[in-house]
Image (cartoon, rainbow, N blue to C red):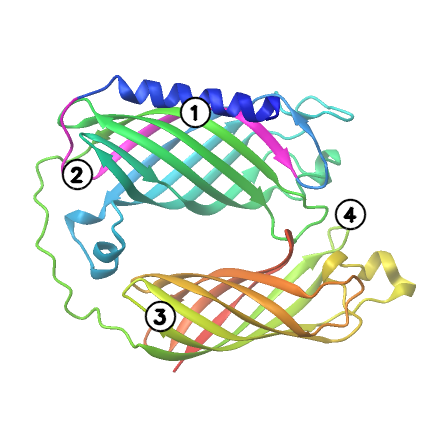
Amino acid sequence: MSFRSCRLLSHVTLLVFVIGVFTVSAQNNAHSLELNLQRSIDNFSANKNFLQGSAYGGELIYHYNVNRKPQKWSSDLGIKSIDVIFNYKRMGNVTRTANPQKGEFGDTYGLLGGLTFPLLQVSKAELAFTPGFGILYAGQSWFSNQNPIVGSRLNFGLKAGLKASVPIGEKTAVSANLDVLHYSNGGSRVPNNGLNTVSIGLSVTRALNNNVEAEAPSFAGEDYKKHTFDLGINVGRRGVFQSRDGLYRTGIYGGYNYRLTSYLGLGAGVDAVYYHTIYDPQRNLETYQSKASSFDRWRVGAAIGPDLWMGRLAFMAKYGYYIHYNSLLPVKTYWTAGAKYKLNSWLGLQSKIYIHQTEADYVGFGLMFTK
């Protein structure tokens, strides 16, 4: 086991010990506000960019308790709250080990939406999974100080965490937290290696309106179709290396969806991506797109994966294999992930990212038609 792994294990052990010393009564169905103070225990990036130093900061989280007004998807899924998260990280001590520069990352400010999934309850202690997704502003980027890890100031933020909580009164609980925060720009500016921060934290949660009674469940009008067909179209742009320019793509998706439960579906279909500018060896710097470089106008793949439904909103992820891709590099498979929001029974908004291995291609925004 490496020194880094031993250090992470020791911190987790300390958190478990801290949780074990609390034993008091539980909260009810209140909305709540949480303050989480954090310190990073590891920072890392892709492409062998090794980092040193610790980040400090925290989160201010508003928890909307779905049990106060339950819906079928939230009841079946078993989530506790929908969360609005403001995340701040002071990054002044974090530098690359090679050619370090003080302040090369700049502080970060994130606004994310999240969920709290209870996983385990022992006596009055609760362990929960806390994913989140949103936008993040970075204080520095390649274009301000030539840091190859952060390609732009505006980024997508993605986090996953574990939180162990115990109440210390009717309206108050304390928690020990462990989470990973990733941010990158989805390929809109390159280089774009992205930054990952592993943090531990201690938090206090306070109920805001503890005396409000929960409503009885009512699932009227929440029916859904078992079988649907989607036709989606999106437009996006991938950055040109070390440039503010970009090359546009248009993505088209057609597929079949089978709804397994109120919150879970399975989809399979075909992705076709049209290149407005293809790769030209005579214009390498202008047209090179790394693993997304194509000699042809179209690439086509077939993909399958799940949809997680939360009312009108769904998060989707699929893994695919290329049927046709005349690529510069030997790429046979791809990932897609994104979200769609139903405006009515047949029309929705969508955002979608295409990924080759761990490298983002582009993020597209557009419409989804459902039959």
Q: Secondary structure at mark 3?
A: loop
As shown in the figure, which amino acid type bears the numbered disc 2?
A: Ala
Per the model, the C-alpha gap separating discs 4 and 3 is 38 Å
Q: Residue at x 34, y 63 (%)?
A: 264
Per the model, the C-alpha gap separating discs 4 and 2 is 49 Å
Give the residue pinned by disc 4: 242
* Label 2 environment density (alpha carbons within 10 Å; few <14, some 14–19, many ≥20): many
Q: Secondary structure at mark 2?
A: loop
Q: Residue at x 21, y 55 (%)?
A: 75
In front of the other: label 4 or label 1? Answer: 1
Residues in magenta, as a range = 24-45
Inspect the magenta stretch and tell me whether residue 173 lies in it: no
Residue 20 horizontal/vertical position (percent): 28, 20
Give the residue pinned by disc 2: 30
Give the residue pinned by disc 1: 12
As shown in the figure, which amino acid type bears the numbered disc 4?
A: Gln
* Label 4 environment density (alpha carbons within 10 Å; few <14, some 14–19, many ≥20): some
Give the residue pinned by disc 3: 343
Q: Quadrant of the N terminus?
A: top right
Q: Secondary structure at mark 1?
A: helix
Q: Main secondary structure of the magenta part?
A: strand
